């Protein structure tokens, strides 16, 4: 019969948490046009710092991928590293447009917590299956959150559409689906303890993403 993939099963099992991360009041307020622009600017500057850490994280996923016997996923992950170069330029442009000075931004508490989590993947003991699954869910939360902001019926302010397109585009969705296939295939071949660790990391990402939106919504 047709079985749901491991990751699809987790999205159902932890559906409430997944929805809290992908339909957060912060992104919902972008979609309904009530977003507070100072909150948007705070998100922009904090996410710039996040993405700089994310580069090192994806590099660690790439390294684990290359150490695999069969590293057929290398090109997809390498594409992810490459697209972050363009993304960092995008952040600089966007920050200039909003009058945000990136040089003077320090990471807030939830961002620091997320950095610490990302850095833990540099440990060689963490398996490729766990790392690539974590990579997939981090990207997917943004894809789903911003995709919703450009779906039918949105009242997203025109000046925020570029941001929403970056992660909400059909192209980014396909990239996330490629990562999901990679994650599922890796999990199928992984030992039970790695599958368990991957599920824990999946849940942890959802919590950290909620924390990141909360941090952006209100100064705390
Ligand atoms: C906090 N999560 C956060 N920032 C991002 N840019 C992504 C996920 C996806 O790239």
Image (spheres, rainbow, N blue to C red):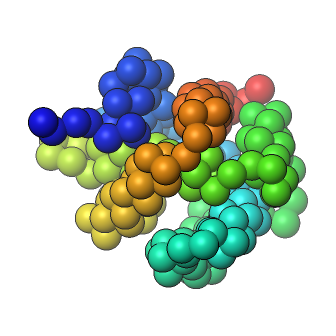
Foreground residue among 137 and 152: 137
The spot of residue 185 in percent (x, y) is 42, 54
Quarter holding the C terminus is top right
Residue 142 visible in the displayed image: no
For the point 26% across and 36% down, the residue is 4
Residue 174 visible in the displayed image: yes
Q: Is residue 181 left or right of residue 1?
A: right
Q: Is residue 134 left or right of residue 46?
A: left
For the point 64% across and 33% down, the residue is 193
Q: Is residue 51 above or below residue 187?
A: below
The spot of residue 92 in percent (x, y) is 66, 73
Quarter holding the N terminus is top left
Q: Is residue 14 above or below residue 105?
A: above
For the point 60% across and 72% down, the residue is 69
Q: Is residue 218 above or below residue 131?
A: above
For the point 87% across and 59% down, the residue is 104
């Amino acid at each position: 019969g047709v079985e749901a993939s491991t990751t699809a099963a987790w999205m159902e099992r932890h559906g409430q948490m997944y929805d809290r991360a992908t339909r957060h009041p912060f992104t919902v307020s972008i979609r309904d046009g009530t977003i507070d622009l100072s909150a948007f600017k705070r998100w922009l500057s904090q996410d710039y710092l996040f993405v700089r850490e994310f580069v090192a994280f994806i590099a660690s996923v790439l390294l684990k991928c290359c150490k695999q016997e069969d590293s057929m996923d290398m090109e997809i992950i390498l594409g992810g590293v490459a697209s972050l170069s363009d993304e960092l330029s995008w952040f600089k442009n966007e920050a200039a447009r909003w009058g945000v000075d990136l040089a003077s931004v320090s990471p807030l508490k939830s961002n620091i917590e997320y950095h610490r989590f990302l850095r833990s993947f540099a440990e060689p003991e963490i398996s490729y299956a766990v790392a690539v699954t974590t990579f997939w869910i981090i990207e997917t939360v943004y894809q789903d959150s911003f995709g919703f902001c450009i779906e039918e019926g949105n009242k997203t302010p025109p000046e925020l559409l570029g941001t929403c397109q970056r992660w909400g585009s059909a192209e980014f969705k396909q990239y996330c689906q490629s990562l999901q296939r990679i994650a599922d295939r890796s999990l199928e071949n992984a030992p039970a303890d790695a599958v368990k660790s991957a599920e824990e990391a999946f849940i942890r990402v959802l919590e950290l993403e909620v924390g990141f939106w909360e941090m952006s919504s209100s100064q705390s």
